[in-house]
Image (tube, rainbow, N blue to C red):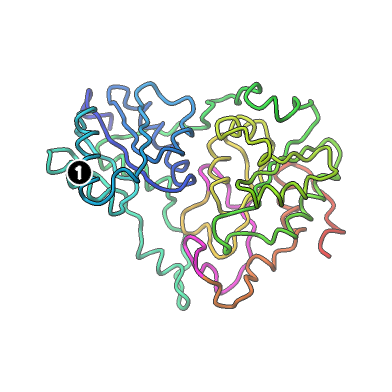
Amino acid sequence: MINEYPGRTALVMRFSALGDIAMSIPALYDACRSCPGTRFVYLTRKHPACLFINAPANLTVVGVDLRRYKGFGGMWRLFSEIRGEYGIDTVVDLHDVLRTKTLRWLFRLAGARVAHIRKGRAEKRRLTRRRDKILLQLEPTAERYADTFRRAHICARRGFRSVFGDGKGPEAAFSHAAAPKTPHERWIAIAPFAKHPGKIYPPEMMRKVTDALASEPDTRIFLFGAGEREKAVLSEWASGKGNVVNMAEADIGLPSELALLSHCDVMVSMDSANMHLASLVGLKTVSVWGATHPFAGFMGFGQSADRAVQLDMICRPCSVFGDKPCFRGDYNCLHGIPPSLILSHIGKALGRQPDPSRQDS
């Protein structure tokens, strides 16, 4: 089915964390390119708006400060502003929370066609409950986004590979932080942090992974983090190593980081936004999973489950987002993963096998 309503304007809404916005971009770009006669307005928070690199010509990204739109009165004002400026006739709600429910209700009353994401909350509860889990692969979130567009009568032909198309990001975007890549060099990105403790591999163990990789010839390591605490940790890891770059100190901005990632050979990340950022540039990712599980549908777009590092434990997964306390109290789902297992997955992704024999102590 091709776009039924040429000339219409579709409002797409997703207010959330960086990773959630990144996950929506493949379906959004595919929809824009499949329906050139439709204008798309993507409503989100201000910070993630910088992710929309090389956006299709019919896409307008509107980043708002939600602190200015509190309560029902604030949502009414936001509705009035967006409707008045863009003349919305279709709404695609990719979030389905109180704010977006209120906005889509107002647009429906104004005569707009409305579709919202089906998150499968009951399925996720059955997957993460403490007893009698139903361990099944749920529909990937990226596909749920595409389904939502289809229910709005916007059918997107799949074709997304990267925000840089079939190429890579411009080297000039990160040249002040990294010297050019040599022909035989391997670039490895490592993003060891996440929002919740149930998704963070022990830093002292990830440092062993970093040290092992940094000891290999023709290898450059880029460490990603944010905030002063993470910057300080990564600074220790990079200290004394000429081939390890602390990108948290470089602070080059998201667009430039995406350009750099497009030149990397593999990323190591948690179940975090960084996995989804890597997916936006088609970068293979070795992802480490603890309290959460790929079955919940949050594997990065285009990523392979074969590169997911995880332990088989009867208590996993215990959480969709990794924000619940470990009822065992030891996070063995993460602490029990030896650095050698992560190194093995990295080696396979690179087509070579690092020697991890001294890294499990």
* Crowding near the residue tagged with mark 1, few <14, some 14–19, many ≥20 C-alpha atoms within 10 Å: some
State the residue at coordinates (60%, 72%). 313
In the rendered structure, the answer to whether residue 89 lies left or right of residue 189 reads left
In the rendered structure, the answer to whether residue 148 lies left or right of residue 335 reads left
Give the amino acid at mark 1. Trp
- x and y percentages locating residue 121 in the rendered image: 36, 62
Q: Is residue 311 magenta?
A: yes
- x and y percentages locating residue 86 in the rendered image: 24, 28
Q: Dot 1 corresponds to which residue?
A: 76
Report the magenta residues as a range: 300-324
Quarter the N terminus occupies: top left
Quarter the C terminus occupies: bottom right
Q: Is residue 132 magenta?
A: no
Q: In the figure, 8 relative to 350: above or below?
A: above
- x and y percentages locating residue 18 in the rendered image: 48, 44
- x and y percentages locating residue 241 in the rendered image: 84, 42
